[in-house]
Amino acid sequence: MTALVHTAEPIDLTVVRDQVEQVVEEFLAAKAAAASGAGHPPEVVRILRDFLASGGKRLRPLLCVVGWHAAGGDEDPAAVLPVAASLELYQTFVLIHDDIIDDSALRRGRPAVHRALAARHVGHDSAARLGAGEALLAGNLALIWCQELLHTAELDTPRRAAVHRVNDTMLAEVMFGQYRDLLGTERLDDDIEAALGIIRYKTAAGTIQRPLQLGVAAGGGDEETHRFCTEFGVPLGEAFQLRDDLLDVFGSPDGRSAPGLNDLREGKHTVLLALAMAGAGPGQRVRLRSLVGRARLDETGAAEIRAILEATGARDGVERMISARYDRCLEVLAGAALPERATEALRRLAVTATQYTA
């Protein structure tokens, strides 16, 4: 593994986030100018810019830059910033398509892209289809530009090849995870391992493990550092999604994240619901199966589901799983011979991933 480097200077994650956002904005500004010059519809680039400006913690690009430092990258992360920024365009693609698949009404407190675009065709018989089609194409463009931005990184040939190997693996894993997630809505059962399998591919790989490895690859990291990314990234990615599942159903104590209905209406095969089915009595199972996955589920029905999730111990069980995975991440981090500033940054990001509120 890369030799331990001692430095008292921490990685300023706020500065890194600003740098990533600047790279994305400059890239999209150039695309907007090119689209205008070619006579392309200007709203397509605007859709992507507005989506990126609507929020997000930039966790993936932050992990990528920290991975660069973990591999012994120098003080100036300019070479890795396009790699990190490409992850924001990739995530934009994933979320826009995910909302189309789930027909979600909202994303980050605003109408989902396909819903907002459909609203432009109000009164048209095919408004929903047109909105979904436009959003699908905008998402595809985000994926294409993600790849293009990745190619702009000024890396030598071995590092460039390593980056693209990790990126190609990530793209496939997340798509397989999305496919598993979609199939999971067909059933409501107590198969906790199947629910965790969805998380490992859909979230753990694409949110933590592979973004971190992209930075390591760009920094020329060795195999041991790549293994660290897996040992640290998989449990943290699982914890991240488990927390997200709780927030979607119960909201956050500080009120910044309100309880939602999406996962319950869609019948997502989450660990939370699998634990509830495992601990439920016959009557509770009947009620869960009659309520979860109902497209017209209202707050009264959702409140009944939440009560069952509490009574069966499913909510507490997920909290314990998050804590266990967070503790595992700290153990892995303590045993890794990373540069001090990378270790400290990863410790902070582990808190962000497992305890975030919105």
Image (spheres, helix red, strand yellow):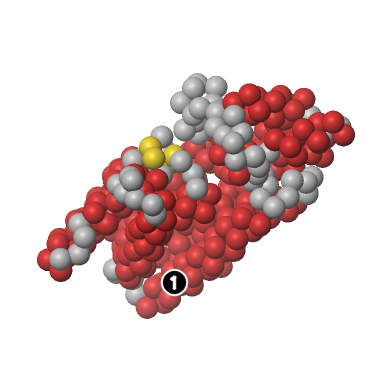
Residue that lies at the very extreme toward the top in this rendered image: 254
Residue 229: in sight, yes or no? no
Q: Residue at x 59, y 26 (%)?
A: 299
Q: Residue at x 75, y 39 (%)?
A: 289
Q: Position of residue 97 (x, y in %)?
A: 46, 56
**Quadrant position of the N terminus in the picture:** bottom right
Taking the image as shown, residue 34 lies to the left or right of residue 254, namely: left
Binning the other alpha carbons within 10 Å of mark 1 as few (below 14), some (14 to 19) or many (20 upward) gives some
152, 14: nearer the viewer: 152
User: Furthest residue to the left?
Assistant: 37
Q: Nearer the viewer, residue 157 or 169?
A: 169
Q: Callout 1: helix, strand or loop?
A: helix
Location of residue 72 in the rendering, given as x and y in whole percent from the top left corner: 42, 59
As displayed, is residue 169 above or below residue 127? below
Residue 178's image quarter?
Answer: bottom right
* Residue hosting label 1: 164
The one nearer the camera, 319 or 176, is 176
The amino acid at mark 1 is: His
Left or right: residue 280 compared with residue 328: right
Q: How many circles with numbers are drawn on the protein?
A: 1
Residue 300 rendering spot, x and y as whole percentages? 63, 24
From the viewer's perspective, is residue 138 above or below residue 284?
A: below
Q: Residue at x 33, y 45 (%)?
A: 122
Q: Residue furthest bottom?
A: 157
Residue at x 79% of width, y 45% of height = 190
Quarter occupied by residue 323: top right
Image side of residue 15 versus residue 6, left or right: left
Q: Position of residue 260 (x, y in %)?
A: 54, 32
| Residue 189 vertical placement versus 315 (above, below) | below
Q: Quadrant of residue 281?
A: top right
